[in-house]
Image (spheres, rainbow, N blue to C red):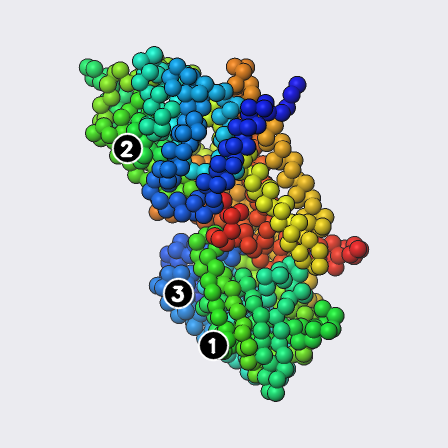
Amino acid sequence: MEFGFSEQELAFREEVEAFLQRELPSDWPERSRHWPGGYGTIEVQDPQMAAIAQEFRRKLAQKGWFTIAWPKEYGGKAHTYMQQAIFDERMSYYRAPNVGIATGIAGPTILRFGTEENKRDWIPRIANAEIEMWLAYSEPDAGSDLASLQMTAVEEGDEYVINGQKIWSTIAHLADYAWLIAKTDPDAHRHRSVSLFVVDNKSPGVTIRPLINIVGVHSFNEVFFDNVRVPKRNLIGEKNAGFYYLMVALDFERLLVGIGGFRRVFEELLECVKQAQRDGEPLGKDSSVRRKLAEIATKIEIAYMFFWRTAEMLDKGLVPNVESSVLKLTTTELSRHLANVVMEIFGPYGQLEAGSEWAPFRGMAPRGYLDCVSATIGAGTSEIQRSIIATRGLGLPRK
Amino acid sequence: MDLDLTQEQRILKSSAREFLKKEYPPSLLREMKDDERGYPQNLWDQMVDLGWTGVLIPEKYGGIGGSFLDLCILLEAMGEVCCQSPFFSTVVLGALAILSAGREEQKEALLPKIADGDLIFALAMTEPGGWYGTYNIAMSAKSDKDDYILDGTKLFVENAHLADYIICVACTNESKTSEGGFTLFLVDSKSPGVKCVPMKTLGYDKQCEVIFDKVSVPKGNVLGKVDQAGSILEKLQDQATVAKCAELVGCIQTAFDLTVAYAKERKQFGRPIGSFQAVQHHCANMVVDVDGSRFITYQAAWKISEGIPASLDVAMAKAWTSSASRRVTSLAHQIHGAISFTEEYDAET
């Protein structure tokens, strides 16, 4: 057993660290308002930050760091998954512009299941960070029960014609392509009736409407597809196998937990507590505050172990499945717990938003309190994760 | 033992709910979030017409002479719709402080105007670095001929920007302790040197930072005895705390009702999500929290109403109800799923 990193891993970690310190503005982690686990905040809100993020992503692509664990023939670095995980941890610790859906979810899924044509069409552009995608999964009546989706894709000549509606489409208004599932065989069993497509946002018939989240940010959209024509070559893998691919894609998504963000927020919180006084006494002397901080620290440590485990499994040739759910459940519940503890620790001052001279913790408390609501809902609710753990993991009966 | 409301209280509750349901839809709450006043005047006028502003004020001062329990019933109904108005700061904090500490001529001058909805009050207590209670209060009130001169800063003063009077806690004795050395002042908010700065918060209420820069307050505007604010505040804090709990009970009742209705109606996997045990257990936990909060709050309210010592009951009610309300709203969000993460949906509040 060895809980430490190898020398090679440590050297890579230092290289990433140095890159982040060099390439990101020093005040970036303070300006980025992302709450770990939350879906509600995106840096592109601020045009100046969006420009920095774009330039930063270009440099990452140059380094080949969008595709750390990909095979060399597809533009990857052929590093280990542990190195990928080390990279993700440092990136999220600095709240750096994130890896994205195309590189984090679509790319690995295409590499695993795509046809040779799929790989030629998409992998180089994904590896070079030329394109970004959005996840076109949820529909008004297909949330936790994704397999009940209604969107149809009907073959017509060299094309599929897509009709239906998607919802909770994060960054659809900013991305280039939809990573989309639709029904291709309405008569088959629901798990063998859907296919996965890449659809150009600019296709005629695509209408994107904003949804404002409770943080006050336009992160979500609802997207309508009205006779949208998609070339057949944009079908990923085999027809009607989409649900199976999707389950694997979701496992990839559940690995993208932004683990470093938890440690970062905790360290910042700790610093604030050390400096804060309450009724003339240092806040950190209060035993209930100390107990809360100790519990959070322990939970973060455990979440980290679940995170490293998934990377270690991938390096051993195993696919994390239940383990992805354990990681997702742990970190998102921690997102809520952390936000609650911040509110409790700062008492009446916790309600103050950024900009107030009396607001502690850069006004992150109200932001986190709202944003954390999304954490345990997106990418499969906590209830869905617990069901996966109980059935797939423990073999408990489904009925 | 009788755990039910009386016939009159049931009527009060149902008529208040009916009125607020009609006059305070969720769209109004959202509309008022960025409004400087935070409430429409005609809503306030109607609340006055219904006698709500005089609920606790004896008939001889122009009120309807109701009980503290009646007040809590109204607050619960307001909590159900998250009604934002100067009711709490005026009728709970202002009227109760005057009733318990005011001299006869102060009662005669101010209470009828509160009952008529003509005066708005705010209470200024917490100071920078301070939390709850009087521990950190450093604002000085120095005697100067016929006046006291108030100097200092107060935080989290709800509705100070609308108030005609700010009831302010200040130090009148340098050897202050937690019990003694503080005095309550009725400060005319238009006095020279009073400055209000709105504080931007997570919620829909309107809180302010209030700076008192050498503000002269006539000695006649002392509320209660000099140096003796401690015992007045202790009583007021008990009452205000239970009143807040009553609002919370209404608020979580609504979150619970919306959620159970949604769990029955929303279908996934070919059945209502409420048919899944995971969701059922969430709902069951919410029942325990909502009903438990109501009972522990009303027990404290009843004791206050009856003049029975209630400090322990009040503390239990607050500790339980505030934690329970976070559990309930968290589960309400969880069961609603993504729809609860949008501004359009009513569960946001």
Q: Which residue is mark 3?
A: A50
Looking at this rendering, what residue extends furthest in the bottom direction? A157
Residue drawn where x is 67% and y is 65% of the image: A148
Residue drawn where x is 51% and y is 48% of the image: B346
Residue A233 disc label: none
What amino acid type is highlighted by mark number 1?
Answer: Lys
From what the image shows, is residue A18 above or below residue B132? below
Q: Residue B139, image x and y in percent?
A: 31, 25
Residue drawn where x is 59% and y is 31% of the image: B293
Q: Which residue is mark 2?
A: B211
Q: Which residue is mark 1?
A: A202
Task: Tell me the quarter of the image containing the N terminus of chain B.
Answer: top right
Say few, some or many: other residues with alpha carbon within 10 Å of mark 1 (under 14 / 14 to 19 / 20 or more).
Answer: few
Considering depth in this image, is B290 or B257 the residue closer to the camera?
B257
Discs 2 and 3 carry the same chain letter: no
Determine the secondary structure under disc 3. helix
Question: Which marked residue is nearer to the observer: mark 3 or mark 1?
Answer: 1
Considering depth in this image, is B226 or A16 the residue closer to the camera?
B226
